[in-house]
Amino acid sequence: MNMKNQQVMNNQDILDLKAQKKANKIKNPKTDIVYFVICGLILFLLAVIIIYPLYYIIIASISDPDAVMTGEVWLYPIKLTFSGYGQLFKNSDIWRSYGNTILYTVLGTVFNVVLTIPAGWALSREYLPFRKLIMVLLIITMFFGGGLVPYIILCRSLGLYQNPLILIIGGGVSVYNVFMCKSFFTSNVPKEVLEAAEIDGAGEIRTFFDLVLPLAKSIISVMVLFYAVGHWNNYIDAYIFNIDQEFYPLQTVLNELLSVTKGGEGDVVLEQMRAATQIKFTSIIVATVPILILYPMIEKHFGQGVLVGSFK
Amino acid sequence: MKKKILALLMAATCALPTLGLMTGCGGNKSKHQFTILAVKESTVQNYNDMPVFKKLNEETGKDVYWTFNTSSQYSQNNDPVNTEGIDAIYHAGFSNKNLYAYGKRNRIVAIDNYLDSMPNFKKILDDRPDIHEALKSPDGHIYSLPRIEEMGLYQYPNILFINKTWIEKLMTNDELALPSGAKLTKEDLKDGLDLKRSDFKDILQKFNTTDMDGDGAVGASGGKEVPLQFVSNNWQGNISDLIASFGLPENIEHKTIVNGQVTFTVEDQKWYDALVELKDWYGKTLIRATAFTQDQDQFLAYGQDGRYGAFYWWEKETVVNKDLRDDYIIVKPLADDNGNRYVGVSNKLEVEKAECVVLSKCRDVKGLLSYFDKFYEPDYSAQLNYGSIESGAFLAEKQDGMLIPNDDHGEQSADDFRMKNAPYGLVYLTDAVWGKTVKMESRAELRQQRLAAYVKPYSYEGATNIPNLNYSEKELNDLYTYESSLGNNINSFMVSVIRGSATQTYEEFLDKNKSSINTVKSINQAAYDRYLTALGKK
Amino acid sequence: MGVDEVKENLPSIDEMTDEEYERMYDAVAEQKTGEAGVCTQSFVENKPLTKAERWKMNFKRRGWILLFIIPALIYVLIFCYGPMYGILIAFQDFMPGDEILGSNTLWVGWENFQTFFANPNFKDYFFNTFLLCIFGFIVGFPLPIIVALLLNSLPRPKIKKGLQILYYAPHFISLVVMVGMLKFIFGSDGLLDALSVKMGGDANGLQLFLKPGAFRPLFIFSGNWQDFGWSAIIYIAALAGVDPALHEAAKVDGASRFKRIFSVDLPAIAPTIIMLMILSVGNLMSCGYEKVLLMQTDGNLETSEILSTYVYKFGLMGGQYGVGTAAGLFNSVINVVLLIIANTVSKKLSGNSMW
């Protein structure tokens, strides 16, 4: 929280050097070339490490399962086949859970954002009554909690056990995100506008809806992304709260698919196993693509100082 | 406009949880007289459609409705007793500790208070004091209905099979010379093959380095062949008898009773010596990593095409497909260099204590228990255990007053048929029934014969399994504290020694687990002594 | 004092001190009441308002703002503070359906803790948790800083942006998928083992998921694969705020790009680094159980059983609620202690602190 001071001091230290810069244009020293080559190599390598596993899943999903099992597929697909996708489309569990997940994600995210954005706004106002108390209450939860078992017992007593509703309202407020919103509003809502509104006698509610919300597009979309990804990727709550299989979200079904080898008897089984191998790859892709599409659409908002804010 | 929508949305979202809470708590009031939660895989037929349950409803005049959890779902349910709208749990499988915890809190019914309306169950308790003793909880009450199926099969769950056509392939001049000097001829290749462990190892090695299936690749480097296969921690077809062949009564829990004394095999140096030898087998890829990672289904699936040189299971018929079955013959328990053979005794019991519990919130406990009591009648027990007469599990006509199993299920295998059609659960099938009112299925008889001929004679001398024991509450708590982590420690040490990735020495391992072993041993010993006293055997 | 005058003199609402704010507020109020022709007593008599009175006035006029935080606050009180009340279970012989505070509650004192500590594997769980987290911290903390520094030094903004987007992407992949991929590549029957057999290796392959020694590296590697780009965002943003003149000045002194990382970039993001370090240390012992559970096999239990998986498996799935809660509480207390220590040390050494 003392970051500003240090930066200011540094700025003053070099004010006079600014003048020098104009005087002589400086070329990059030769050692820089070596540096940039190494730096580029490292960053390139990291990119490869990120891309390769994703690429491997894609080529494995469209290759012959036997070729995948024997390690022949690692650079390009072998014996191109889309049967894995065909099988997947026939799997009703996957599609039902896909529908469930979309429902949970949409409703859950709306619930999250509706709780979080106004809370962030209120906290960013110094005149909020009990502000300090509320802040303390929120911060404590970031570092101390009752733990898993009491949490489940609480939800049980609220009737949320074996109730899919928990997949929508569970994790309703992330305190971390609230603080992110708070600092966004602190630094991104022009004071002049607010003061004018205040003097006009606009009430708190009108101010929020008319003035603040239109300015909060980027923080809202970032919150949508964060919360939506959280809902989309949640698999364990369905287990913990013992949700009926009919209401399983996608990731839980996926986990069953990836961790269990179903079998029976006879030669059919080997065929089933081959198919199961391929479905594993295709289901991963089908489950991940929506998130990877949503992400670049919202990514452009990351830069607007949204993320850094939470630490000031 | 926009803000109105937003405000509306906000109000709606805030209202959402309350709404849901209400619907969540509303509960589904069942229209049926009784609703029972059963643990059932989705591949098994719906109990409500099963002829045997329809008949039970009809005969008892009760309206019983079944709801289901799959086993994975049920295992995640940390409090099934609180499930809305159910009266009982079938295939409950509670641990002794949980059974008593629920009983103590009065959430499940003490069955012994209702024996008057349960003639069949009462008779079982009177006829079998050992079962009566086993069912008691620390406070003396019986909180669950048991499953009792006695055929004498569970004690010895591992038979070693070997691929004789592969051995024939290895023969030169119709003979296979073995390191011990013995020679195998074609005449030897029949059930009951006599092999020393060292010779067996040599054969496995040849399986591993010869292209047995003729596909151009040998097992040791990428071919399909697997020299020896098992499922290390499964209740059947596990690693135990391979370790037992080193001269100790091993089973998957590593504990057994020898001459009245509770014993841990891991304390025997021979146990560690066995692991060290098996490490060599693993290193030579005679034992594969899959033996430690696979589940039963995977083992059975890959076995079908005859890629296993040898395997442990309690029958070959489920492992290998029909056409290749005759390739496999039974090997007697492996002999050590002095020709001695040993087989351990499994602790899997023929009496499953907590098969079914009735919840205290049931409105008519007496009625439900009298319904369950019917299950213990021989005809119903048989049909529950194997499938109904209507579905074709038994012949329609009784012979000599006995239900006769129908072995012909068309294309379906016996296992598949049974998995689909039999609900299992509360049965009483013992010598009081076999050969009197129900004929044993031929598979079971075959297994009995095989065990009698090739396995039982080599049972470790003086070894018996640990029966259902009656623990005090404190003992239950202590067992819980020590047993689960002890089991993990032993198994992970075992696997890591065999796989050559052990981080501790045998001494360190023993040292670390000494106190747990002693605690578990002394609790079991005390309970076992009480058990003997109660039965008047001591 | 006129309203405009006050406004000019004051920096902005947010940077005002309480007093300044009150001055402005009074002025605004005066103007308003003046217009309406009604004067409150305090203005007439020109007495300064007491604190309570001022608070009351503020509340009356702007109390509506509370409406915005109340839903979130209620949620937090129920779902975050509710379980804190449930901590009492750690001192009970508890089964679901029991009252936490009632006449039938079975209190057992410290017995659950004793059971937990008496567990012969307690030490292992503790050290496994500690080692997993500390190694994760040692690798995972500096990596995003290094990446941010390298990225920041790239001269082409387009490449920089492109790489950045790529690096973030894995953050959004779910745990299930992540571990699934890990098994496809490093597991038995996975790519690596298939390749090793193909290259003439042992038919058993490497079986990394069965090796106790491989669990931590796999866990940490995959965790970093997923999050290094994401964690770098904060540093990249902080670096973007560095005055270019600083770099120019250093160049004049003949500092190479590499040297400038240490002389210019690092000092600029030092406060951010320290802040994040405090946060990380506070969470050092709180490895989640989800990913560990997904990666656990019988083969690697020796290193992969940690406190939180113990709570999940024995406390929740095994129905030992009391012991599970006791173990969870033990873990939480350690976290808080660590956080306090980290914060105090940082305050002493660098003057940076969270509170």
Image (cartoon, helix red, strand yellow):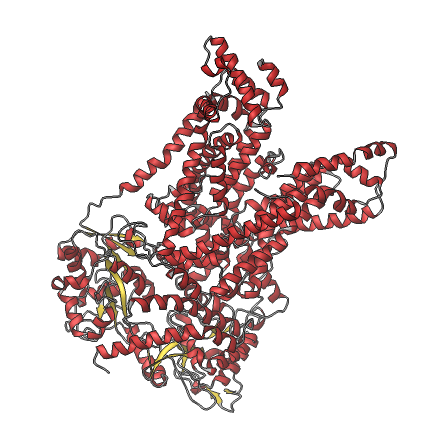
Q: Is residue B85 left or right of residue C161?
A: left
Residue found farthest to the right: A24
Given residues C355 and C230, the one toward you in this image is C355
- Residue in the picture at 63% in, 48% down: C348
Q: Is residue C331 above or below residue B233?
A: above
Total tally of numbered discs in the picture = 0
Quadrant of the image for the C terminus of chain C? top right
Q: Is residue B433 above or below residue B200?
A: above
Point out residue C277 in the picture as x, y percentages from the top left corner.
61, 48
Camera-nearest residue between B112 and C349 = C349
Q: Is residue A168 above or below residue B128?
A: above
Q: Position of residue B139 (x, y in %)?
A: 23, 66
In the picture, measured across the screen, residue C336 lies left or right of residue B361, that is right
Q: Return the x and y of residue A248 as percentages of the image width and height.
A: 40, 47
- The answer to which image quadrant residue B144 occupies is bottom left
Q: Is residue B13 visible?
A: yes
Quadrant where the N terminus of chain C is found in the figure = top right
Between residues C134 and C13, which one lies in front from this camera angle?
A: C13
Q: Nearer the viewer, residue B442 or B40?
A: B40
In this rendering, does residue B2 appear at all?
no
Image coordinates for residue B37, horizontal then vertical, percent: 27, 54
